[in-house]
Image (cartoon, rainbow, N blue to C red):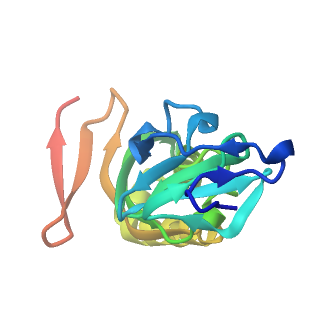
Amino acid sequence: MVSENNAIVSTEVSNNQIFKVQPTYSANDLNRIDTGQLGKIILKEYERIVVFRFSRFFKNCHMGPGPVKLLKGIDEIALQVDLRELFKTVEIVEYTKDRVPLEIILAIFYEISDPISTINLKGFPQSFLNQANVIIAGHIRGNNLGQILKEKRRIQEEAKEELIKFMVRYGVRINRFEFYSIAVQNPSVKQTSFFVNTTNVQYTSVVRNA
């Protein structure tokens, strides 16, 4: 409830005690200040926050961009997200089916399409990257080295589909999912890496002595 002088009024406080609006903060301040001290924050065009009021979704939606008013001691910022396309790399080291240690560096481009759903994934984005690691590690363990090097595109596409199916329920859209490099991590074998040429998305091999 807002009075004529734009002060925020809490209906839960007796005697109509008024919580005055606190100084304005940017979204960058959210991680270092107590929510109880907030009155109003300014979110950039690509920023959103999910707010709990009395530990429940406020208006069942995310808030932002622009100025957002919060009730002192009542509202809780449950999640802050960036709606721009984001880029992460994941390094996976696992043994192949024929017991060859293999390192794959995975490049993932993703964006958040539904912040409300994202809040259901605990520890985002690290848990999202852990899931990508689990999926790729499973494919490494299930194939011989020769199969992985020969059919890397097929494995890449299958892993991408698995990750998309997992993340769609949490409001995360996977735009690109690529093996940046594949390297044999065995001192007794020549180190072989396969790098992606991002211009034409063709694979070239580079062989170097162990």
Q: Is residue 69 left or right of residue 106?
A: right
Identify the residue at image location x=18%, y=64%.
Answer: 198
Give coordinates of residue 23: x percent, y percent. Answer: 45, 40
Q: Is residue 46 left or right of residue 15?
A: left
Please tell me how many numbered marks the rendered image carries: 0
Give coordinates of residue 162: x percent, y percent. Answer: 58, 68
Location of the C terminus (image quadrant): top left
Give coordinates of residue 86: x percent, y percent. Answer: 36, 58
Location of the N terminus (image quadrant): bottom right
Q: Is residue 159 left or right of residue 47?
A: right
Identify the residue at image location x=43%, y=44%.
Answer: 24
Identify the residue at image location x=73%, y=61%.
Answer: 57
Q: Is residue 137 left or right of residue 186?
A: right
Whether residue 148 is visible to the viewer of this picture, yes or no, is: yes
Whether residue 106 is visible to the viewer of this picture, yes or no, is: no
- 27 to 49, vertically: above or below: above
